[in-house]
Amino acid sequence: MLIEILLALCLLGALVVFVLPDDYAPVGALVASLFPLVTSFLMWFGFDGSGNAFLEGGTLAYETMAQWISVGPYAINWHVGVDGISMPLVVMTTVLTTLAILTAWTPIDERRSQFYGLVLFLETGLLGVFVALDFFAWLVFWEIVLIPMYMLIGVWGGPRRKYAAIKFFVYTNVATLVMFLGFAALVFGLGDAVTSLDMPAIAQALRAGELGSLGGVGPDTLKLIAFVAMFAGFAVKVPIVPVHTWLPDAHVEAPTPASVLLAGVLLKMGTYALLRFNFTMLPDTASQLAPYIAILAVVSVIYGAMLALAQQDLKRIVAYSSISSMGFVILGLVAYTEFGLGGATFQMLSHGLISGLLFACVGVIYNTTHSRMVGDMAGLADRMPVTTAMFVAGCFAYMGLPFMAGFMGEYFIFQGSFAADFAGSMVFTAIAMFGIVIVAGYLLYAMQRTLFGEFRLDTDYTIGRAAFHDVVPLAVLVICIIGLGTAPDVFFGMIQDAVGPLLGGGA
């Protein structure tokens, strides 16, 4: 029942914070976020699962299966549980939510109760996506996430917030429809082989070759159509080039806490779904399309990095760098090796922490200087030494320096993708590795121009040291990044245990 308690604590916390007076909302939200945080750590310390949640033989932790409703021949159950893939993402979500609430204390000064309530409501949806094992419940949580994120951007965002919020909503909502059509084709194609929307049961039936014809379309073609539809839908959420254009606008206009959760967790919904649906349910089709997916991954890495290199807005630089980093995750998934799949999952964690740190740093810099433009400032290190140290640590982690989380994720991915057996895998990997050089280029450029040299700021604001509550989340994230980089096995062992069964082959 710990998963139900976890979700209930998030939802109850959101409702309580909604009705609190604005003056008490920040502290109330922080306290409310600590309950799911502690619960997730209890789940992590007591985790006793093995194998993969979607495949036969997997032993889930904290699993609950209960009859819910029936729709025609299909039963819809309340089925939740965690394995080695979802457990680390649950912990990361609760940690980043608590830290995101702290980052809101300075910039959010109006309608605080609604803001913090929506953040906790968003946490409920994010956690639900990672723990739900029935498609209906999973889809409900998947859609719930859109509402609070749309409102956080649209109400508390920057000057172009309405445009960014609508663009975010339209892109992701249309993507969900496309994904749904692909998944529905698989369910109807399975016919009597499945009697519920239980995702593990559907995955096992597909891998066992139970898929039949649908509307005169043979099973092989049906798998290809469904794979492409689901991939297209999830690719928007990741995002992958060329369906990435909503991301920079959303990040630039979103308030800092929303950016932290958007880059840290929400993008991982897309890669998590790709792993669970495309690469788990249809491994043969994934292998068939591997070279094409690898091309998209490499283009995302290089194109995202080149776009970041051309930006002057610090927030836009970090936003485009996320597109590049998520390209690495896709490259690890398509490699379909133990290190590739494990590295991709580990990179979800490391990117969540690193991007969260960089967006939080940019938020502190903006709160202090009222500018995010690289050309407007220089020499901030003398006036903001602690924030500078944290920002430098985040940049080094993004560059993949040893003993930091970014290095471990990229190393695992490259080792896995070099060993992949699809045509051109070594060439794709080598080109993607060149992206690290570009990443180092634009981050060093941004650091050199804003942090070092003679102090200069092209605004009238006085520069002082950041407040304690602004620095705490940065310090915690740096500790997590170094901890995950020096001791990756705190999560990598359980990740390997969960992704290993995927390599057993498919139908």
Image (tube, helix red, strand yellow):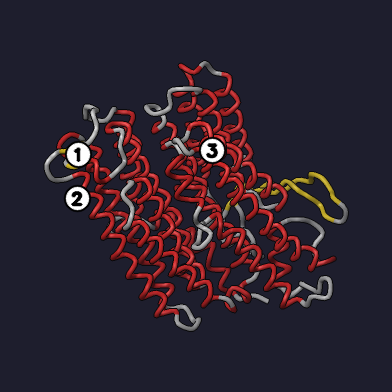
What element does badge 2 sit on?
Answer: helix
Residue 262 locus on image (x, y percent): 48, 45
Left or right relative to 506: residue 42: left
Instruction: Determine if residue 248 is in view.
Output: yes
Closer to the camera, 234 or 372? 372
**Rendered view: 29 above or below 275:** above
Disc 2 residue type? Gln
In this figure, which residue is indicated by the disc labeled 3? Answer: 162
Residue drawn where x is 65% and y is 70% of the image: 282
Q: Are marks 2 and 3 in contact (CB under 8 Å)?
A: no
Disc 1 residue type? Leu
Residue 18 locus on image (x, y percent): 57, 23
Task: Give the residue furthest to the left.
Answer: 454
On residue 86, the disc is none
Left or right relative to 246: residue 356: left
**Rendered view: 157 above or below 324:** above
Camera-near label (3 vs 1) is 3
On residue 448, the disc is 2
**Rendered view: 231 above or below 126:** below
Q: Badge 2, how many Cα within 10 Å: few under 14, some, many 20+?
A: some
In this figure, which residue is indicated by the disc labeled 1? Answer: 380
Disc 3 residue type? Lys
Residue drawn where x is 73% and y is 68% of the image: 205
**Rendered view: 270 above or below 193:** above
Left or right relative to 450: residue 222: right
Q: Earlier in the sequence, mark 2 or mark 1?
A: 1
Residue drawn where x is 61% and y is 57% of the image: 59
Residue 311 locus on image (x, y percent): 33, 53
